[in-house]
C-alpha cells in the first residue's frame, strides 16, 4: 500500500488525539527526532517513569551533589528499548554519541553526557528519557491520515518549563486547539 508523502516532521511534536488510548501514547507529546522515507523516531516528553535522575546516576556509579539534578524526573521516551537512555538537549555539545535533530535539538546516548551532567558541566537544559518511539516506513503517515496525531513545531518552553501533567494541554494550545474541544473519535469530511 502506498502512503501519501508527508512533509518532514523532524523537530515537531506529535500530539496524541484523545482517541489514541494506547499506553504510553495516551495524551502523549512526542518530539520527532528523525522522520524520513524509512520511518520515524521520537521521544515522548510528558510520560513520567518511576525513576529519578539520581537513580540512573547511582546505577552507573556516578557521584552527584546537585540535589535538583538528582531529583529530576526520568521520562518514558517510548516502548522501544526501554532500558536505553536518551538525553534530549538544546546545545549540540561535544559528547561521543550525539545526534543533531535540527538546529535547535540534539539527542545524546553516550555515558559521557551523564558524567558531565553529574559534574555540573552538562547542557544547560536537558531531559532524560528511557526508550523511544519508532514508526516503520509509511506507518506514521497512515496514523496522521487516521487522525491519531496533531503536529506542530516543538517548543522548548513545553519540554523544559511546563509541568509534565500540563504538557499535552499546552501542546494542543500551540496548535490553536482547546484540548477540551477535541473529539474522542476520528472523522473525515
Image (cartoon, rainbow, N blue to C red):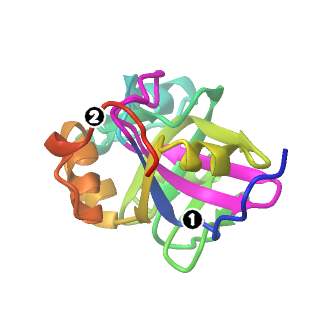
**Relative height, residue 6 to residue 86 (above, below):** below
From this view, report whether residue 58 is shown above or below residue 103. Answer: above
Against 27, residue 156 (above or below) is below
**CA distance for labels 2 and 1:** 23 Å
Q: Is residue 39 magenta?
A: yes
Split into 4 quadrants, where in the image is the N terminus?
top right
Label 2 sits on a secondary structure element that is loop
Q: Is mark 1 on a helix, strand or loop?
A: strand
| Residue 22 x, y percent position in the rendering | 48, 22
Which residue is located at x 42 percent, y 37 percent? 186
| Mark 2 closeness class: few <14, some 14–19, many ≥20 residues within 10 Å | few
* Location of mark 2 (residue): 71
Q: In this view, does 142 lie to the left or right of 162?
A: right
Image coordinates of residue 159 in percent, x first then y, are: 33, 55
**Does 130 appear above or below 97?**
above
Q: Residue at x 57, y 65 (%)?
A: 106
The 10 Å Cα crowd at callout 1, few under 14, some 14 to 19, many 20 or more, is many
One can see residue 109 in this view: no
Residue 106, numbered circle:
1
Which numbered tag is attached to residue 115?
A: none
What's the residue at 46%, 31% (across, down)? 25
Q: What residue appears at the point 72 percent right and 57 percent down from the top-left corner?
A: 97
Q: In this view, does 20 lie to the left or right of 132?
A: left
Amino acid at each position: 500500500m502506498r502512503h501519501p508523502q508527508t512533509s518532514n516532521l523532524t523537530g515537531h511534536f506529535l500530539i496524541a488525539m484523545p482517541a489514541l488510548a494506547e499506553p504510553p501514547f495516551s495524551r502523549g507529546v512526542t518530539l520527532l527526532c528523525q522522520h524520513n522515507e524509512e520511518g520515524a523516531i521520537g521521544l515522548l516528553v510528558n510520560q513520567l517513569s518511576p525513576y529519578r535522575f539520581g537513580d540512573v546516576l547511582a546505577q552507573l556509579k556516578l557521584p552527584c551533589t546537585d540535589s535538583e539534578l538528582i531529583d529530576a524526573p526520568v521520562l518514558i521516551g517510548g516502548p522501544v528499548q526501554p532500558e536505553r537512555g536518551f538525553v534530549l538537549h538544546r546545545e549540540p555539545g561535544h559528547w561521543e554519541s550525539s545526534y543533531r535533530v535540527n538546529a535547535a535539538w540534539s539527542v545524546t546516548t553516550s555515558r559521557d553526557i551523564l558524567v558531565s551532567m553529574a559534574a555540573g558541566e552538562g547542557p544547560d537544559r536537558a531531559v532524560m528519557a528511557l526508550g523511544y518511539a519508532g514508526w516503520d516506513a509509511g506507518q506514521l503517515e497512515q496514523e496522521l491520515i487516521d487522525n491519531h496525531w496533531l503536529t506542530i513545531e516543538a517548543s522548548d518552553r513545553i519540554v523544559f518549563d511546563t509541568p509534565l501533567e500540563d504538557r499535552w494541554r499546552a501542546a494542543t494550545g500551540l496548535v490553536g486547539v482547546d484540548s477540551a474541544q477535541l473529539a474522542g473519535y476520528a472523522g473525515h469530511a
